[in-house]
Each structure stands twice: as structure tokens, then as C-alpha cells.
Image (tube, helix red, strand yellow):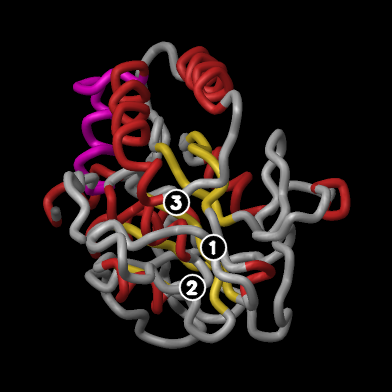
Amino acid sequence: MSHRPLFRAPLIRTAAALGSGELHLTAYLEQVRARIEQIEPDVRAFVPEADRWQRLRREVAALEARTSDGADRPPLYGIAVGVKDCFRVDGLPTRAGSALPPALFDGPEASVVTAVRAAGAVILGKTAMDEFAYSEPAATRNPHNLEHTPGGSSSGSAAAVAAGLCPLALGTQTSRSVIGPAAFCGVVGYKPSFGRIEIDGVIPLAPSFDTVGMLTQDVAGMRLGASALIPDWRSPASPRPASRSGASRSSPTTNWRRWIGAR
């Protein structure tokens, strides 16, 4: 049984519209809300949250207050980001896909989530995942066909991006937990080299293998996400360093303006 509609939510185009003021944050939030209300009951990509929209309105208002003049907006300004439930997020409970009390997983917010916020994004919510990224699968369904699996364990992140509920989502991978769901759901999954993104604040499966990854609808969007969240990111289009010691790397603050021509 195919599920329609699915929405195009390319990160580059959305970031450009928000960053330039072409799309107002409040209008974008209502757009996201309408999509979630239409699709989420079937896809089940997100962990339920009773006051999601009140919280997001507060976050959007705070973001607007910090950037009231519109100058030099951060690269992910206003972007709604889904975060796998194994990441600690200030203000949201963490259960790692389990039914255990969130208090068991209390601790500082994951560094990468803090970086997402610093890049101007708002946290749309926790995405569903296999229990502890290993066992009982989430209730998430593949948005292309509700009878098919979205893959695991970053199932909610992949399904949310595929359905167009958010243009960027965080996942984790120990063996195939980002690239597998990405393939199942027809989106781009990126697993950086081990340790490229800090793993602190993430409920571990195998700390010697666990890697933070990202999901977007296209490669150009992934470049923007990587440039905002990965330290010393260097685009494949950038010149290769002449030597290992004399490498010149691009700034991690590279924003949507650099990639707008690549969409």
C-alpha cells in the first residue's frame, strides 16, 4: 500500500528561503506542522510529544530574537531537525527506543545537538529507533509503502526525511544503521569516519564503533549539513591539500550560500 503524499524538502532550498527571509519562520513551522498532522499518524517517524508545537513556537521566537536584524544568519537558520532518540537533547526525554524511565538516561546534551542549535536549527523532535539500536524494532513504517520496513535502527530519522517532514535528521551507525534505512527509504545517508563527530551524549551500543551520521533528501543538502556540523569540513570541490602538514581546510561555518548553486 503506497502512502501519498510525500513532500520534497531539500535542505539547500529550505535553508536559502529561510536565510534570505523569503520564507518566514512562523510560516515554515506551520508548513511542517501541517505535513506532520497529515503523514505522521501513518508513518510514525517521531516519538510522541504532547507540547511539541508550543515548545517549537518558543524556540522559533527565541531564534528570531537572536537574529532580529537578519544579518549573517547561521547556515541552518530555522531548519527543523529530527534527532534519533539515543541522543540526549535538553528539554526532551531520552529513552533510546525503550520503555524505561527517561531519568535513567539523564545527562548533558550531546555535543552534536548543541552544534545543530548553534547552526540555527530547531529540534523538531526525537525520531523513533530500534530499542537500544539493536533489538525491538520501532513502529515506524516506510513512507513509500506502509507495508514495508524503513530499515533500522535509525528508522524514524530516515522515514521523516523521506516523507519530507524535516530536511535533516541525525542518526547513529554501528554497522549499517544510517546507510541501511537511507537505502530502504530512498534518501541520502552519510556516515562520517569514526570519531569525526563527537559521540558524547549518545546512548551507546558499541562505543568503539558507534558513529554519528546524518540523513537528507539529496547530496547537496548533505554537503550543507556536513559543513555546518563537522569540524574542518572540506568540500570535495575544494582543492586537495598539497601535503599532509600544509593542508588548508574550509571553515565549518560554511553556509547555504556556498551550496545554493549545487541544488
Whichever of labels 1 and 3 marks the residue nearer the N terminus, that label is 3
User: Which of the 4 image quadrants contains residue 217?
Assistant: bottom left
- Residue on which disc 2 sits: 152
Q: What residue sits 80% from the left and 47% below the top?
A: 102
Q: Are marks 2 and 1 in contact (CB under 8 Å)?
A: yes
Residue beneath label 3, please? 45
Where residue 142 appears, as percent x and y from the top left, is 33, 62
Image position of 114 with respect to 55: above or below: below
x then y, percent, for residue 222: 32, 60
Q: State left or right for residue 114 relative to residue 239.
A: right
- Residue 19 among those drawn in magenta: yes
Which amino acid is tagged 2?
Gly
x, y percent for residue 123: 52, 38
- Residues in magenta, as a range: 10-25
Which residue is depicted at the point 21% across and 61% down? 1
The tag earlier along the polypeptide, 3 or 2, is 3
